[in-house]
């Protein structure tokens, strides 16, 4: 989609002019202007209580024999006091839903009159454009012809009151475009079906993205992983005929050569459970078990597009978890890259096995901090549902920074405790540690397992099991991969880079 920022004029021609309207009150000036064009329709609609400006409420009106816009779309942003960037983003998304449904492919947004406390015009433009781009996303690779409902918006104009605002809006729009490129890539990767999406496919997609964006990429193949001794990762991979990769991406944005921030993403391209086979119901969704990897790869793309002044390294262990004559069995003992031995009690707890080696490997970079993202436990969905990802870790400051980025971005996190007593549940009788801790506190014992491999640096773990996949589809996220975490991480990185 094309996004343009233009100076406003009283004689705008556009198929649809969009106004954000707070609940209860429309500024008299705006109202007069709208009524002028639309034969008092706006006042009439408000009087009839057909449109109150409730959050994400919409009203589409047609101009009657006037010049100027052909239509007007009022979009509620709710009570002025409660308005936030996240609400604005969602309101913009609900506008897109109307435009798509009515087959309107070009629209103009007016931001004048928008009041959101403690925000700049740049931030508002960013939120609006993000809302639009996220809602406009579709995965149509396998649908011929595209369904009727799939008419994306082609062009969008943002109106600026003056030259100074124009520059701000342009900056906000550019930022949103870079970030949403990352979210869209993450969604595409998650939505790709398991037959296409081998570990090699994921590796090739990451390399292609890196080459186009000035990011260094290298792949550790099976032979190299054997040489290094990545026994945990290789153990999970051995049930599949498709070989594993450890994908490493490096983005150098800070010329001072400061220690990198590291991102680690679980890349199980399909999780059958292995010999501890999952039930058939909804197993198709397990193509999303590389959601952490997708978010990390998407974040690298967005960071490069934004030219963030930070050094980043991304490590993605990519494997397929299959049952076969070669697969690992319950009771098997694997020797990880760290040297620690792991008793595999359940082959379906495979994410922590591959992450163990990835977390050890990333230590080579002496990272300033490590953040891992993983669709790690069903227990996380039981705890938090689909409203927040769980965060756990060994550094309160890092966790607080991420919690705040979650608040700002609307991609929320909720902290769970990682008291040392939980580690008691993963003590093994036969090895250094076992890969399951029973049903109680499943998300925490999974993190306690990871912690054993993340003791060299500041570390936070995000369990995104309930967030990586949108089951029904909602404003801004069609059914399928959500790209959850890209906006959150970029928000954190902007903060870290002092540019928020
Ligand atoms: N990938 C799953 C977790 C998952 C479940 C993600 C549902 C998204 C939706 C993970 O590999 C898994 O199977 N975890 C097991 C661990 C258990 C065997 C200790 C689980 O949560 O049941
Ligand atoms: Mn599993
Ligand atoms: Zn899994």
Image: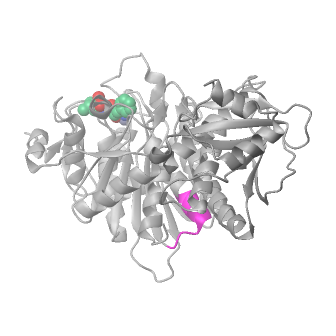
Q: Is residue 469 left or right of residue 326?
A: right
Q: Is residue 408 left or right of residue 231?
A: right
Q: Quadrant of residue 172?
A: bottom right
**Which is nearer the eye, 355 or 341?**
355
Residue drawn where x is 47% and y is 71% of the image:
311
| Residue 352 image position (x, y, % from top left) | 29, 43
| Applied colour scheme | one colour
Residue 448 in view here: yes
Vertical order, 327 against 173 (above or below)? above
Secondary structure mainly formed by the magenta segment: helix
Q: Is residue 7 magenta?
A: no
| Residue 391 image position (x, y, % from top left) | 29, 48
Vertical order, 116 against 24 (above or below)? below
**Which is nearer the eye, 191 or 486?**
486
**Which is nearer the eye, 242 or 52?**
52
Residue drawn where x is 51% and y is 81% of the image:
255
Magenta segment boundaries in residue numbering:
300-309
Residue drawn where x is 18% and y is 47% of the image:
417
| Residue 404 image position (x, y, % from top left) | 36, 56
Residue drawn where x is 65% and y is 66% of the image:
168
Q: Quadrant of residue 149?
A: top right
Vertical order, 21 against 48 (above or below)? below
Vertical order, 455 against 275 (above or below)? below
Q: Quadrant of residue 344?
A: top left
């Amino acid at each position: 989609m094309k996004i343009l920022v233009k100076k406003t004029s009283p004689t705008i021609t556009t198929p649809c002019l969009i106004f954000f309207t707070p609940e209860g009150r429309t500024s008299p000036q705006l109202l007069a202007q709208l009524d002028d064009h639309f034969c008092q329709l706006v006042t009439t609609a408000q009087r009839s209580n057909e449109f109150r400006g409730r959050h994400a409420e919409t009203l589409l009106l047609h101009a009657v024999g006037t010049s100027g816009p052909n239509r007007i779309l009022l979009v509620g942003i709710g009570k002025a006091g409660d308005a936030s960037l996240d609400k604005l983003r969602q309101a913009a998304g609900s506008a897109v839903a109307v435009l798509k449904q009515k087959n309107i492919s070009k629209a103009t947004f007016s931001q004048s009159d928008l009041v959101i406390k403690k925000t700049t015009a740049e931030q508002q433009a960013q939120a609006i454009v993000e809302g639009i781009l996220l809602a406009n996303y579709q995965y149509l690779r396998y649908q011929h012809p595209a369904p009727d409902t799939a008419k994306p918006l082609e062009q969008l104009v943002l109106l600026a009151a003056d030259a100074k605002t124009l520059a701000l809006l342009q900056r906000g729009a550019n930022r949103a475009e870079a970030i949403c490129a990352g979210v869209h890539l993450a969604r595409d990767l998650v939505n790709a079906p398991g037959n296409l999406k081998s570990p090699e496919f994921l590796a090739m997609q990451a390399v292609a993205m890196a080459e186009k964006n000035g990011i260094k990429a290298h792949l550790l193949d099976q032979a190299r992983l054997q040489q290094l001794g990545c026994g945990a990762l290789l153990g999970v991979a051995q049930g599949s005929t498709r070989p594993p990769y450890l994908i490493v991406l490096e983005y150098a944005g800070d010329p001072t050569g400061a220690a990198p921030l590291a991102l680690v993403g679980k890349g199980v391209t399909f999780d059958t459970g292995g010999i501890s086979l999952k039930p058939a119901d909804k197993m198709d969704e397990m193509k999303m078990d590389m959601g952490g990897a997708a978010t990390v790869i998407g974040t690298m793309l967005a960071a490069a597009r934004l030219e963030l002044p930070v050094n980043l390294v991304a490590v993605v262990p990519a494997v397929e978890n299959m049952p076969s004559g070669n697969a690992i069995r319950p009771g098997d003992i694997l020797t990880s890259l760290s040297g620690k031995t792991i008793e595999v009690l359940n082959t379906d707890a495979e994410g922590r096995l591959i992450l163990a080696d990835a977390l050890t490997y990333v230590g080579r970079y002496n990272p300033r901090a490590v953040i891992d993202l993983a669709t790690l436990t069903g227990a996380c969905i039981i705890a938090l549902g689909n409203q927040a990802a769980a965060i756990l870790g060994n550094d309160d400051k890092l966790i607080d920074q991420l919690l705040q980025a979650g608040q700002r971005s609307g991609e929320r996190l909720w902290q769970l405790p990682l008291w040392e007593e939980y580690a008691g549940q993963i003590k093994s009788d036969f090895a250094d540690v076992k890969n399951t801790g029973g049903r109680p506190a499943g998300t925490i014992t999974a993190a306690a397992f990871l912690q054993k491999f993340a003791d060299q640096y500041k570390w936070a773990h995000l369990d995104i099991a309930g967030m990586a996949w949108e089951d029904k589809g909602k404003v801004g996220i069609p059914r399928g991969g959500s790209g959850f975490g890209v906006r959150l991480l970029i928000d954190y990185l902007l903060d870290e880079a002092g540019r928020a």
